[in-house]
Amino acid sequence: QVQLVESGGGSVQPGGSLRLSCVVTGLTWDDDDEEDYFIGWFRQAPGKEREGISCINNRNGWIEYKDSVKGRFTISRNSAKNITYLTMNSLKPEDTAVYYCAADRLLCAVVADARYTFDHWGRGTQVTVSS
């Protein structure tokens, strides 16, 4: 059974930083892996559409970011521990949302339509940026 569990959310002031973690179980996750997955992050704020932020490919390490977070957010992974991180710096009030981790064999979260159903996703972690 595949599970994704997010953690690391919280409340910070504008300009602050957070690091989100996504622990993935039930998927093989190393360089010899025959399964090609995109592990990504998306967010959803109240009253707004889901928004893909970033993704990383588990086999070749290919990374993509949404334009609005480029230079501020960094996605990385610890293959040995099956953990994907999203390090968020220079946070802005408009970054406030519930952040979700998703795994998909076909699409990176950044390019997926807001109505696309990922293969697997977690329950999310709240990020609030406010003064």
Image (spheres, rainbow, N blue to C red):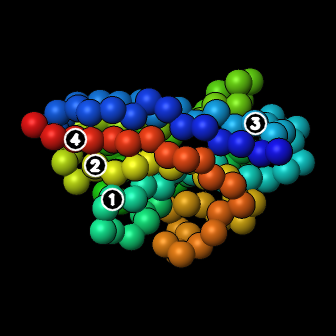
Q: Mark 1 and mark 4: span between their CA atoms?
A: 12 Å
**Mark 2: which secondary structure?**
loop
CA–CA distance between discs 1 and 3?
27 Å
First in residue order: circle 3 vs circle 2: 3
Amino acid type shown at disc 2: Thr
Q: Mark 1 points at which residue?
A: 45
Residue 76 horizontal/vertical position (percent): 55, 35
| Distance CA(mark 2)–CA(mark 1) | 7 Å
For marks 1 and 3 on the same chain, the one whose residue lies earlier in the sequence: 3
- Cβ atoms under marks 1 and 3 closer than 8 Å: no
Q: Are marks 2 and 4 in contact (CB under 8 Å)?
A: yes
Where is 72 relative to 77, above or below? Answer: below
Is the residue 15 above or below the residue 108 in the image?
A: above
**Amino acid type for the residue under numbered disc 3:** Thr
Dot 3 falls on a residue whose secondary structure is strand
* Dots 3, 4 in contact, CB < 8 A: no
Quick one: label 4, few (<14), some, or many (20+) residues within 10 Å? some
Q: Quadrant of residue 73?
A: top left
What's under tag 1, amino acid-wise? Ala
- Residue visible at 69% across and 37% down? 24
Distance of mark 3 from mark 4, alpha carbons? 30 Å
Task: State if disc 1 and disc 2 touch (CB < 8 Å).
Answer: yes
x and y percentages locating residue 124 in the rendered image: 50, 46
Q: Is mark 1 on a helix, strand or loop?
A: loop
Q: Extreme left residue here?
A: 131
Assess disc 3: are there few (<14), some (14-19) or many (≥20) residues with their C-alpha within 10 Å of its C-alpha: some
Q: Position of residue 63 (x, y in %)?
A: 56, 49
Q: Is residue 113 above or below residue 85?
A: below
